[in-house]
Image: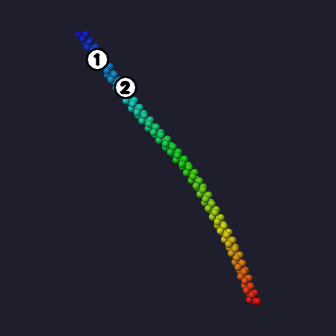
Amino acid sequence: DKNTIENQLNETIDSLKQDHERHCKELQTEIDELNEREEKTVHQHESEFEQQRKDYEDKLEEAILASQRTQTQLAELLEEKSKFEDTSILLKQDIERLQTELEDRDRTQNMATNEREAHYQAQIKELETKKHQSLDEIQNL
């Protein structure tokens, strides 16, 4: 009877060992699957984050280049504006100078015209005086 109990105990122990080994294998398989899924998920997230980082980096680079182009255009426009302002100042100075020259020329011409007119008036007066004198002389004859 003792042998039977011992055999049964051994069978039960063997059965428990087998169950334990089977459970261990199942658990290890589950652990392996979970680890694999976790690794895939982590890798996927890392890939997504890396892609997002790369996209943001590309967009940042594009924004920097656009900003640099805008700054270059602004500098060119400011330079052009400065040249236009300088040209405008020079043109205004030329206009003022030419206007002054024209006014001086008009004044000089008016003075010359007035002098000629005064001279002609004096000549006319002198000729009229000579004419009257001649007429008086003719009448006296």
Placement of 133 over or under 108, stated as above or below: below
**Identity of the amino acid at label 1?**
Ser
Of residues 52 and 131, the one drawn nearer to the viewer in this rendering: 131
Work out how far the residue at label 1 is from the one at label 2, CA to CA, in angstroms: 25 Å
Residue 32: give its label.
Answer: 2
From this viewpoint, which residue is outermost toward the left? 1
How many residues crowd mark 2 within 10 Å: few (<14), some (14–19), many (20+)?
A: few
How many residues crowd mark 1 within 10 Å: few (<14), some (14–19), many (20+)?
A: few
Of residues 8 and 83, the one drawn nearer to the viewer in this rendering: 83
- Quadrant (top left/top right/bottom left/bottom right) for the C terminus: bottom right
At 25% from the left and 10% from the top, the residue drawn is: 3
- Quadrant (top left/top right/bottom left/bottom right) for the N terminus: top left
**Identity of the amino acid at label 2?**
Asp
Q: Position of residue 94 (x, y in %)?
A: 63, 60
Placement of 42 over or under 84, stated as above or below: above
Total numbered labels: 2
Name the image quarter holding residue 85. Answer: bottom right
Residue 136: give its label.
Answer: none
Left or right side of 22 for 66: right
Of the two numbered discs 1 and 2 on the same chain, state the one appearing first in sequence: 1
- Residue under label 1: 15
Q: Position of residue 110 (x, y in %)?
A: 66, 71
From this viewpoint, which residue is outermost toward the right? 141
Q: Position of residue 122 (x, y in %)?
A: 71, 78
> What colouring method underlies this structural image?
rainbow
Placement of 130 over or under 69, stated as above or below: below
**SS class of the residue under badge 1?**
helix
Q: Position of residue 9 (x, y in %)?
A: 27, 14
At 52% from the left and 47% from the top, the residue drawn is: 70
